Amino acid sequence: MKIKQIMIYQLHGNWSGSAYPAGDRQARPLDIYPEFNIHEEYSPFPGQTRSEMYVEIITDQGVSGMFGPIDGTQVFIIQHHLAKFLLGRDPLATELLHDQMMRLNRHGRTGYFMTGISAVDCALWDLKGKWLNQPIYRLLGGPTRPVIPAYASLLGYSVEPQKAAETALYYKQQGFSAQKWFFRFGPGDGAEGMAKNLAMARAVREAVGNDYRLMFDAFMGWDLPYALEMARGLAPINPFWLEEPLYPERIEGFTKIRSSGVPVATGEHVYTRWQVKQLLMEQAVDVLQTDPDWTGGISEQIKICVLASAFDVPVVAHGHSLLPALHIAAAQPPVVVPMVEYLIRHQAVKQFFHTPFFEPENGSIRLPDLPGLGFNLDDEKIERKVTLFSAE
């Protein structure tokens, strides 16, 4: 069997789901500059029209694999660097192709290039599962459990303390055993912004109780002095982790924050096992969040899980898309991958064109039973399908 064709599609449809309440965005690194630190009402549904891109790998035996949604930078890497290289090759040799793709470009072991490799790798695993008529977690040695716990990731909800407290209690009552909140303010907002951050954190802690797992995300929007002061303020709230207070390459800063007694998580913007190894060797992280959509695909995320297990550091993948992380979790011991992230507002968008739709029930997600990644495109949602790229 050989790869015969690689295609990238753009799907268009109309959102008909219910609206989410207006909310707040997270802090961002550019917020230290007033021209960028402006109020924006957060909504993942800027209009009724939905448009998403997918990559499909087609073989001469008729079986194909698909992954998406993907973004424009992934499309560029696939189109200009990966597609022609992959044509004519054995799609089932995922380890070989993964290693070769990582050796293909001298700038290709981090950043955008790795996100392109990740999309292709996930599509190849989808293809392999469909060829063998098995879900991916079966091919990886799972399942290790019948359902996977998920935490409620509440990006885009209001961080006004009373509203945040009401939302936190609601999602606890829905059966989630953990949830994550996103800080809106950083160094550019001064002491007033820090006070607002802490007021939100205290309000949600009071709402859910002292024994409930609460995580907080700073999205790389802080500097070290600000992060250390925030950590001191958060310590009495007992966060399960503080996520990305700094850029992940600032490893010494992470170790200083950890020394304050607040657990630290990072990895969403970390690529490959070698960057992960540095974080682990320097004892800079309590929880790893590498994302199979970006860090190198399912093939690389499995290696990262093995590496992290040797350091007794759990992996809780960033939840850019759900299915690759879900399959990996289902093939790893619970102590290695204890749960997955479920971005409440974003998954409605990410899975808009998918059937079936995966969402937590009483805080856990069922395992896919279809072969491959476990989804099909929902023809009833697709009003227009445009081919953006085709190589054969």
Image (spheres, rainbow, N blue to C red):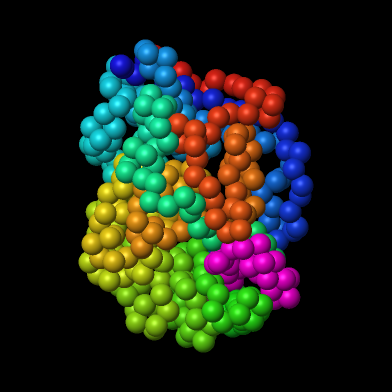
Q: Is residue 102 above or below residue 362?
A: above
Q: Where is residue 201 in the image (x, y as percent from the top left)?
A: 60, 77
Q: Which residues, given as a range, are shown in magenta?
A: 159-188
Q: Point out residue 196 in the picture as x, y percentages from the top left corner.
A: 64, 78
Residue 227 versus residue 145 in the image, above or below: below
**Residue 177 position within the rendered picture, expressed as x and y whole percent measured from the top left:** 55, 66
Q: In the picture, which quadrant includes the C terminus?
A: top left
Q: In front here: 10 or 152?
A: 152
Vertical comparison of 10 with 225: above or below: above
Note whether residue 214 is visible: yes
- Asked whether 178 falls inside the magenta stretch, the response is yes
Residue at point 61%, 80% (across, down)? 209
| Residue 5 at least partly seen | no
Query: Residue 22's x, y, as percent?
Result: 74, 58
Left or right of residue 50: residue 341: left
Does the stretch in magenta take in 239? no
| Rendered residue at 46%/22% (across/down) | 7
Q: Which residue lies furthest to the front in this view?
A: 146
